[in-house]
Image (cartoon, coloured by chain):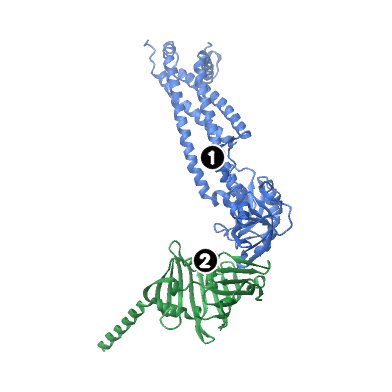
């Protein structure tokens, strides 16, 4: 009896040590679907503020984490607003101006996406935690009721991210990331993403309800994935400013 | 000399009258001494008034430049608007209330504005700008008229006036169309294309780099904040530093959900800079007063020593020491009041002349000030309380210096010498 407990403990310790050696692998596995699969999705967002709540409906096409096209389908006043990211180029189309506008790359790092707590790069493709960061394994922790590996990620030099540090909690099983905390050495936590609900879309396991919080949790935005489909035919050449102009909501 | 009691009058009044008459005669007895003492007081006050008026005047000039034209002496805004200045915390328009505020005798002008930040792009160039929606009445004001660097204020709706440096950055010329986009009211999308109708000298390089002025209605449409104001910029009639009408205005013209904030509250760093600099000025005034004070004391000691024999003689003849001391005191009082009156008058005239023809800085300093957006002049403050305060201080110093001759009166022995 005693012996089996000891064995069990040993076995547990060895898995931890095993994992501890591969935080990069853990992250690469967690990101595999998001970065590796081109997709089409329909999303709805709900931003909660002290004085109002704001609903936003989006259609989104993505290819790796460097190409994305987002079209706003609601509310009516913002319908037709579009964003395109093609690697380092960003463009926007505002229907009322009828013009495609090139956005400075710094927009990717700055501010919220259309008045929500999600950032531009959350939606238009954020840097790869596995490839663009260095990692430090911090053990396991239970987050949102799920056992997770806690990994501290520091951006490699030259990677355009606003955060000085990202702490990732990745499910010990196959659910992927459960919480990401984007932190700044100067002002603490900038943003937090929580995967609240997981589901299976087009045969792929993924978070279907996500919460973005800023200002220490005083402001939150809930994002629901309504539809998600694999789009293997998408490639980098598909994401052009002309596509931005033509794609209707 | 009539014996006081012979007239049956109040002996105290009679004594006082006697003291004044004798003091006046004593002043006339050594005119040069009286003149020197009076002139010392007059000049001290003259310089103190000029020094302080210029210093406080420069603060007023600074505040007028930094606050008066842009964010306003007083802002009426939603209680949550400051300090984030978030567009989401806008006020509902209330034209009736605005009319009532404008009718107030203490209010020189009140203009509603809507403002926020957006990206402004022209072709491949872009810049982040603070867009300010100003009402047609405000655009009519001479201040904005004077700011126009190129183009015209007469333009159709959908026009934008860019800060000079922002226009340079975008390579925008009058007639070009810029696209502005950003976050609008309560998370909505703000987007519009505006025709550049002019460029503006904002008087401050930072403002020139990031200002885009549009009509209020265009701004409301752009941001989706229909019928809303970010704040109302209020300029009171009196703008002296020590006169803050914010509380009074707020009490007289309440607007639900809004608060009145003076620049002192919104920009504590400015008032702190002024206070720090002002205390430096006070130190200089203190040194001036110490120098003048010792000068006066020297004159007083001289006066006392010169008149020692006179005092001894009078005491020997039976003059009461109290009356003698009273006479000396009245002498100093007359001298200091006259000196102060002359000094105040001269100081006032000088201040008025400086106001009419302000000192103008030259060379590098002037260029640096102009870069910062200030007209390089040193205008004096016309606040009358400066003269009154410093006249009071100088009279008190003179009276303190008079302690020495008074002491002499009480120490002089009638039988020596």
Helix, strand or loop at disc 2?
A: loop
Return the residue nearer the eye: A35 or B316: A35
Helix, strand or loop at disc 1?
A: helix
**Rendered-image quadrant of the C terminus of chain B:** top left
| CA distance separating discs 1 and 2 | 40 Å
Percent position of residue B127, x then y: 59, 59
Report the residue that reaches farthest toward the left: A3
Q: Which residue is mark 1?
A: B365
Percent position of residue B92, x then y: 66, 60
Percent position of residue B286, x then y: 46, 33
- Location of residue B95 by image quarter: bottom right
Return the residue nearer the eye: A5 or B207: B207
Question: Does B226 sit above or below residue B267?
Answer: below
- Does the rendering let one see residue B46? yes
Percent position of residue A116, x then y: 56, 69
Question: Does B54 sit above or below residue A147?
Answer: above
Question: Does A244 sit above or below residue B266?
Answer: below
Q: Which residue is mark 2?
A: A109
Q: Which chain is green?
A: A
Q: Are marks 1 and 2 on the same chain?
A: no
Q: Colour of chain B?
A: blue
């Amino acid at each position: 009896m005693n012996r089996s407990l000891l064995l069990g403990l040993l076995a547990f310790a060895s898995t931890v040590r095993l994992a501890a050696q591969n935080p990069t692998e853990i992250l690469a596995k967690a990101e595999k679907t998001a970065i590796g699969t081109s997709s089409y999705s329909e999303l709805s967002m709900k931003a909660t503020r002290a004085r109002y709540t704001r609903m936003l409906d989006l259609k989104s096409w993505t290819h790796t984490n460097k190409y994305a096209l987002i079209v706003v389908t609601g509310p009516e006043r913002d319908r037709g607003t579009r964003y395109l990211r093609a690697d380092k180029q960003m463009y926007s189309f505002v229907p009322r101006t009828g013009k495609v506008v090139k956005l400075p790359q710094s927009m990717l790092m700055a501010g919220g996406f259309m008045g929500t707590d999600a950032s531009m790069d959350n939606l238009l493709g954020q840097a790869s935690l596995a490839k663009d960061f260095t990692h430090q394994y911090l053990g396991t922790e239970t987050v949102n009721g799920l056992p997770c590996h806690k990994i501290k990620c520091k951006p490699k030099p030259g990677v355009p991210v606003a955060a000085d540090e990202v702490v990732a909690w990745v499910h010990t099983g196959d659910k992927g990331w459960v919480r990401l905390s984007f932190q700044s050495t100067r002002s603490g936590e900038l943003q937090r993403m929580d995967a609240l609900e997981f589901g299976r879309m087009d045969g792929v396991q993924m978070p279907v309800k996500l919460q973005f919080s800023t200002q220490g949790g005083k402001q939150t935005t809930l994002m629901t994935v309504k539809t998600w489909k694999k789009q293997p035919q998408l490639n980098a050449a598909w994401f052009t400013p002309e596509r931005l102009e033509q794609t209707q909501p | 000399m009539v014996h006081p009691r012979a007239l049956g009058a109040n002996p105290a009044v009679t004594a006082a009258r006697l003291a004044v008459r004798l003091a006046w005669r004593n002043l006339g007895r050594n005119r040069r001494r009286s003149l020197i003492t009076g002139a010392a007081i007059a000049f001290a006050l003259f310089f103190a008034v000029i020094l302080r008026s210029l210093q406080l005047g420069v603060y007023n000039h600074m505040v007028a430049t930094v606050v008066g034209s842009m964010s306003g002496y007083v802002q009426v805004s939603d209680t949550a608007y400051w300090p984030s200045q978030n567009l989401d915390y806008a006020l509902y328009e209330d034209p009736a209330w605005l009319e009532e505020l404008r009718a107030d005798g203490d209010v020189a002008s009140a203009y509603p504005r809507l403002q926020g930040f957006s990206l402004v792009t022209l072709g491949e160039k872009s810049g982040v700008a603070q867009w300010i929606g100003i009402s047609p009445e405000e655009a009519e004001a001479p201040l904005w008229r004077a700011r126009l660097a190129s183009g015209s204020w007469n333009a159709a709706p959908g026009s934008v006036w860019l800060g000079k440096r922002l226009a340079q950055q975008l390579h925008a010329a009058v007639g070009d169309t810029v696209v502005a986009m950003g976050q609008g009211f309560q998370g909505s999308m703000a987007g519009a294309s505006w025709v550049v109708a002019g460029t503006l000298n904002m008087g401050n390089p930072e403002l020139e780099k990031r200002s885009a002025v549009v009509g209020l209605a265009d701004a409301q449409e752009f941001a989706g904040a229909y019928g809303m104001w970010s704040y109302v910029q209020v300029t009171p009639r009196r703008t002296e530093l020590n006169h803050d009408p914010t509380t009074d205005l707020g009490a007289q013209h309440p607007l639900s959900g809004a608060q009145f904030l003076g620049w002192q509250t919104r920009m504590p760093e400015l008032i702190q800079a002024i206070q720090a600099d002002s205390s430096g000025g006070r130190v200089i005034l203190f040194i001036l007063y110490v120098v003048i004070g010792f000068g006066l004391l020297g004159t007083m000691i001289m006066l006392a020593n010169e008149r020692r024999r006179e005092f001894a003689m009078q005491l020997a003849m039976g003059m009461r020491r109290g009356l003698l001391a009273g006479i000396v005191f009245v002498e100093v009082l007359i001298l200091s009041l006259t000196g102060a009156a002359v000094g105040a008058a001269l100081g006032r005239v000088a201040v008025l002349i400086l106001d009419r023809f302000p000192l103008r800085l030259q060379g590098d300093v002037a260029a640096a000030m102009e870069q910062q957006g200030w007209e390089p002049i040193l205008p004096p403050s016309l606040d009358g309380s400066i003269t009154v305060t410093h006249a009071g201080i100088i009279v008190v110093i003179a009276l303190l210096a008079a302690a020495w001759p008074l002491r002499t009166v009480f120490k002089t022995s009638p039988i020596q010498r």
